[in-house]
Image (tube, helix red, strand yellow):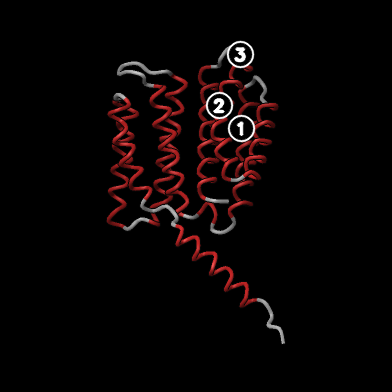
Amino acid sequence: MRADTFARLVALETLVDAEVGYWLEFHPASLDRFRETLVARVSDLVDEVDALDAVAAARVYDALVDFLAELPEDDDGIVEATLHFKRAVDRLVERGMGAPGPEDPAAWAVVLDALLEELLAEYRRAVPEPGTFEPRGYLRVRHLLARGREAAERMTPAVAPERRRELRDAMDRLAFAVLSRRPPADVLEPLVRDAQRLARRHRPSDVTRIGSYVMKQILRRVREPRQP
């Protein structure tokens, strides 16, 4: 599984968490309408996964269908159904990525980039003008921000010590803007792009992927018994 696929799965899981959080906090009148809105929000991400990895897309689609089919109307039941979905995504990632898999700091740089892109798109819808915001969309923004800050910390082993403060400063500036100031989207965008620029410096490069492939081939040949 490529890091780009992993990143979109993390973003999808984060949006599901936000949707469930919205249900638990506000208890919408219609569970069917809740399902429809959730599906509409994550469908583009499922399509993006499909373009990158059809097998992963089929499995996450099945997990999503099971999740939606299992949804009861009581809070405890919804939490349990969500946990079941999240563990299914975990298993998909662990099987697909192998070692070091989700522990790879460079993969989290890709995740951070994708989460920030989703955050900006969601923010444009949730905060159409200063002083107003749409609660469901704004909750998604907050969840994407929280997961983005986690991704930034998980990528720091790949970041030179002198650059870590720069990355943390960028994420903190973004957090203050989103959580406390809620500026217009065009004011928020430079803060998002600054953090993305720092994340993209540490994405896995083609050279890195080729080098990893070559090393695996060498190790395989070393382990294979030589023909007489």
Q: Percent from the top left, x then y, of residue 154? A: 43, 50
In this view of the protein, which residue sits in the foreground, 24 or 49? 49
Find the residue positioned furthest to the right.
228
* Nearest to N terminus: mark 3 or mark 2: 2
Q: Residue at x 47, y 21 (%)?
A: 136
* Nearest to N terminus: mark 1 or mark 2: 2
What is the C-alpha distance between the residues marked 3 and 2?
14 Å
The kind of residue on which mark 2 rests is: Val
What is the C-alpha distance between the residues marked 3 and 1?
18 Å
Residue under label 3: 30
1 and 2 marks in contact (CB < 8 Å): yes
Q: Residue at x 55, y 16 (%)?
A: 27
Toward which corner of the image does residue 204 lie, by quadrant?
Answer: bottom left
Residue under label 2: 20
Name the secondary structure under disc 2.
helix
Q: Residue at x 63, y 40 (%)?
A: 57
Find the residue positioned furthest to the bottom.
228
Q: Percent from the top left, x then y, of residue 143? A: 45, 32
- On screen, residue 187 versus residue 106, left or right, reads left
Question: In the picture shown, does residue 187 fall above or below 96?
Answer: above
Disc 1 packing (10 Å; few <14; some 14–19; many ≥20): many
- On screen, residue 111 versus residue 23, left or right, reads left
Quadrant that contains the C terminus: bottom right
In this view of the protein, which residue sits in the foreground, 188 or 141? 188
Q: Percent from the top left, x then y, of residue 117? A: 41, 36
3 and 1 marks in contact (CB < 8 Å): no
